[in-house]
Amino acid sequence: MDSWWLEAAAASPLILAAAGFAIPPLSLAIKSRSFWGAYASVVTGAVLALIVGMTKHVLLSGPVSYWFGGWPPPLGIVYVIDGLSAIFASVIAMVIFLTVAYSAWYMRRFSAGPWYYTLFLLLEAGSLGCVMTSDLFNLFVMVEVLAVSAYGLVSYFRSSRRSVAASARYAFVGAAATTLYFIAVVFVYGSFGTVNMADVAVKARGLVDQSLQAFSGGDYGEVALASTVAIALSLWVFTFKSGLFPNHFWLPDANAEAPTPVSAAFASAVDAVGVYAVIRLLFTIFGSGSVLERVGARTVIFAVLFALGIGSALVGALLMNIQRDVKRVLAYSTISHVGIIYMAIAAAGLGAGAAASALTASLYHILTNVVGEALLFLSFGVLIAAAGSRDLDKLSSVGRAPSLVATAGVIVGVLTLFGIPPFMGFFSKLLVFISLLDSGLVFGAVMLLVSTAISLMGYVKLARAALSSSGEGSRLGPALPCTIIVVLIVLSFALGVLFPEVKSVLDHVSGSVVGSVNEYVNALSEVIG
């Protein structure tokens, strides 16, 4: 690294963890609850600035790496940030900063204590660690940090039996999931003798040791079988984290019972971590030319993800139509859009000639889901605070909009996620539709249109609830949350209007990811070699 701020950005998970763990002892001396909201906002804002600067550097100059303790890979833990990591890190840092700042207003009525912000900072530390690490075991550690923080945040309202029950269900299945991922890491280490992602990627392609092409019976044992088992276990875990059908069952309860800022973070940043891990596993570690492709397992895996993506898109769209709790409607909306993202990822794997463009479509739709869901959750948070209820009928009967800005945020969020130009959702869905056709997945393109049509009634319900509460005497609303809502409205509009520029950046990132020996591997291959 050539700048201290790049090292600070790469080490941001450690900075966030240190800042989070500093809160409990400091709270013994500082009793002001408002101080901790400001403290967490400053920390997450500083991290966002570092991440954005690092992202710009990576996109212009190539990947950066950070060796913990000075130990070189593959022996030491190393963080590698390429274009894919940088984009996901920027998305996560942005969402966490906005939701933490929003919490300073929203959580005042619940007298949120310092532990709330400790958990939020650790949630960001785990999320950023997941997308930055180049070590499969360290990924397990970061997933645990993310998961434990999430369990605590879901059950933050300890007096609510539903919150505790939702957290318990999430924690029980989540603990089983991380255990399965640990077993997957054992399989990888036993086969390749390393847990460094770039090292495994090189060996899985047979670029370092040609004896790997024997696959079984050689020095490394049943490499093909072990790799297939490892990827199967890992994909179950990360489709659970991203809320893909049928592993979506935790998301509606967790989103409904968690504080609204946490729900926004779950529906955008946390889900993005699961999607990132799947892309990293299938395109970087076991990508084109790897042992999985040579034995035909990659095709099967992508076919399964394609089917699950369709199922998730349809199930989410159908179930969001019958919900009365606005946060459950938004949770099923997230599940539906996650399905669309996985359909595009599957198109990248099944359509060789359209791999890069399909991956671009998936990345663009990830941005749509992040911005759209965050905008809807935070906008409805203002309306929920005024109505004192999450029931759509009661929200509609408020009689006067507590905030015209929040109402506008709901409308823009609905237009974004449904896919109406000039907002970004139209362009991301268009890219997904074209990529499915280019990959020969015509059925998937039809199901994309069907799921979008089915979701219409759910989005109409959301818009009606916001619009019917408007009336004479309506006002702009509280300054802090409305400023955040305006930022997201502008972002959705700008990412749509600037479609050619955004697509060009994502095309560059996608092209480096789907290469037979991609940019990420090259960042460390010389050191490993």
Image: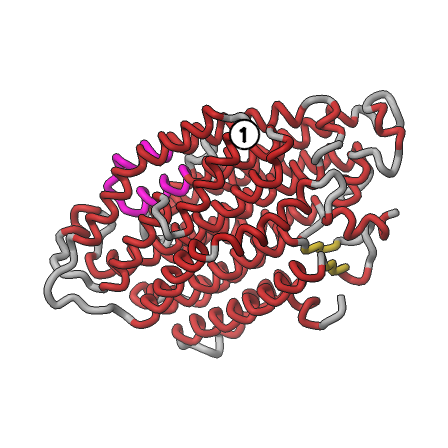
Pinpoint residue 291: horizontal percent, then vertical percent. 76, 29
Q: Judge by depth and name the residue closer to the eye, 358 or 167.
A: 358
Pinpoint residue 288: horizontal percent, then vertical percent. 71, 34
Q: Is residue 259 above or below residue 173?
A: below
**Magenta span of residues:** 315-336
Pinpoint residue 371: horizontal percent, then vertical percent. 42, 54
Residue under the point 43% across and 59% down: 494
Residue neighbourhood size for the residue with mark 1, other residues' Cα within 10 Å, grouped as few (<14), some (14–19), many (≥20) = many
- Left or right, 294 with respect to 91, comes to right
Q: Quadrant of the N terminus?
A: bottom right
Q: Secondary structure at mark 1?
A: helix
Q: Is residue 479 above or below residue 400?
A: below
Which residue is disc 1 drawn over? 305
**Outermost residue, front direction?**
500
Q: Is residue 227 above or below residue 391?
A: above
- Left or right, 10 with respect to 31, comes to right
Pinpoint residue 162: horizontal percent, then vertical percent. 33, 44
Asked whether 332 falls inside the magenta stretch, the response is: yes
Residue under the point 51% across and 53% down: 500
Asked whether 121 falls inside the magenta stretch, the response is: no
Q: Judge by depth and name the residue closer to the eye, 149 or 467.
A: 467
Residue under the point 81% across and 37% down: 203
Q: Judge by depth and name the residue closer to the eye, 34 or 355.
A: 355
- Residue 290 visible: yes
- The quarter of the displayed image where residue 406 is located: bottom left
Q: Is residue 61 above or below residue 186?
A: below
What kind of residue is marked 1? Leu
- The quarter of the displayed image where residue 98 is located: bottom left
- Tally the numbered discs: 1
Which SS does the magenta portion mostly show?
helix
Structure colour scheme = secondary structure
- Residue 123 visible: no
